[in-house]
Amino acid sequence: MSITVREAAVTDGALLHELAAATFGLACPPGTPPEDARAFVLSELSAERFEGYLADAHRALLLAEVDGVAAGYSMLIFEEPTDADAAAVVTARPTVELSKFYVMAESHGTGLSVALMAVTVEIARLRDAASIWLGVNQQNGRANRFYEKSGFSLVGTKQFALGDRLEDDFVRELPL
């Protein structure tokens, strides 16, 4: 198995949308109505939205591949936190948000996530970030364990709107 991580190209919007459609539900808490997850993917993770993200100089998107096949992605946002709860608890500045970090279920436990995280952190360092922060659903045990192993400390909480519900997220921060 050959793992590679590369910067996403401007032509990768549709591919990123396909990955998002296949992986977003993996991060949703139990009981999330499937129609809410689908609606979020269609509105926030569409091919067109990804094309906009790829054109945004304040974002960096990475694709992780296994044997040349896309199997995961990450997105960094190089701006101050717009969420007031996150802004209040993230201490190191300048900071960058790890807004998206998803890997196909069949790649869990293969080392793909570790490789993708290493390159994601390196990109943040190269752009002079002092920390990376993220929000992760409190009920997502797999993701929370992975972020802890990756050095992200629990620093607070925030909420995430999904459909008509507000989900409870942990805010985690990694000093660089």
Image (cartoon, rainbow, N blue to C red):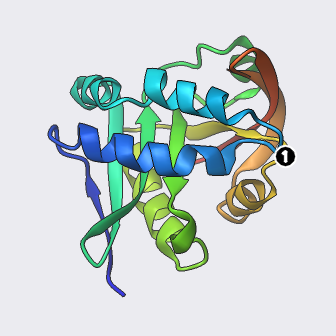
Q: Residue at x 42, y 28 (%)?
A: 78
Q: In the picture provided, is 121 more to the left or to the right than 168?
A: left
Q: Position of residue 97 (x, y in %)?
A: 54, 33
Residue 69 falls in image quadrant: bottom left
Pointer 1 residue: 139
Q: Residue at x 81, y 37 (%)?
A: 155
Residue 35 falls in image quadrant: top right
Mark 1 secondary-structure assignment:
loop
Residue 102 seen by the camera = yes
The residue lying toward the viewer, choosing from 3 and 19, is: 19
Task: Establish if 149 lies above or below 156.
Answer: below
Task: Establish if 86 lies above or below 170.
Answer: above
Q: Residue furthest bottom?
A: 1
Task: Establish if 176 lies above or below 5.
Answer: above
Q: Residue at x 53, y 72 (%)?
A: 106
Task: Establish if 99 lies above or below 12.
Answer: above
Q: Position of residue 81 (x, y in %)?
A: 59, 19
Disc 1 packing (10 Å; few <14; some 14–19; many ≥20): some
Q: Position of residue 173 (x, y in %)?
A: 68, 41
Count how many numbered circles sit on residues in the image. Answer: 1
Q: Residue at x 77, y 48 (%)?
A: 153
Q: Position of residue 39 (x, y in %)?
A: 55, 25
Residue 94 seen by the camera = no
Q: In the picture provided, is 62 more to the left or to the right than 93?
A: left
- Which quadrant, please, contains the N terminus? bottom left
Question: Which amino acid, mark 1?
Answer: Gln
